[in-house]
Image: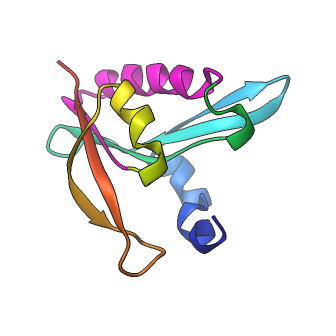
Amino acid sequence: MAMCREELAIAERTLSQRDVWVAEIEGTIVGFFGLEAPEDGVSVVNPIFVEPDLQQGGVGRALWRKLEERARAAGARAIGLDSDPHAVGFYEKMGCRIIGWSPSGSIPGRKLPKMEKPLV
């Protein structure tokens, strides 16, 4: 995570350039996502995060439901993202499939699964 800190940091301009939502428990942010406006029909998820201690507890699913709702409302035909290799299983459960590979923005030589989910 430390090697990816800069890449995963959310700049203030991101808040105005993307549809950003947070998940809270008792006033504490426990997860969030940013959704880019559709380009060629695909809304890209960037970033998405759930506190590690709360993963597999429903927070990610709740965020994903909202993310799909927002992508459809924006007119997207699909959702795309570059996944952490350890999160592929979650995204597959959400209906995504690997469509290729993207270079990591933080770790030279590392490839990230490029995933997509059609919204039909």
The residue at the far bottom in this view is: 108
Position of 25 with respect to 107 (left or right) is right
User: Magenta includes 73?
Assistant: yes
Reply above or below: 106 against 22: below
Q: Quadrant of the N terminus?
A: bottom right
Q: Residue placed at 34% from the left, 32% from the top?
A: 92
Reply above or below: 82 against 79: below
Position of 113 with respect to 105 (left or right) is left
User: Magenta includes 77?
Assistant: yes
- Residue 30: which quarter of the image? top right
Reply above or below: 24 against 102: above
Residue 50 placed where, x, y %?
Answer: 63, 39
Q: Quadrant of the C terminus?
A: top left
Q: Residue placed at 48% from the left, 21% from the top?
A: 66
Q: Residue placed at 22% from the left, 40% from the top?
A: 42
Residue 10 placed where, x, y %?
Answer: 60, 57
Reply above or below: 17 against 94: below
For the residue pair 6 and 16, the one nearer the viewer reads as 6
In magenta, the rendered stretch is 57-82
Q: Residue placed at 39% from the left, 34% from the top?
A: 91
For the residue pair 30 and 17, the one nearer the viewer reads as 30
Residue 40 placed where, x, y %?
Answer: 14, 44
Position of 111 with respect to 11 (left or right) is left
The answer to whether residue 13 is visible is yes
Position of 93 with respect to 100 (left or right) is right
- Residue 79: which quarter of the image? top left
The answer to whether residue 51 is visible is no
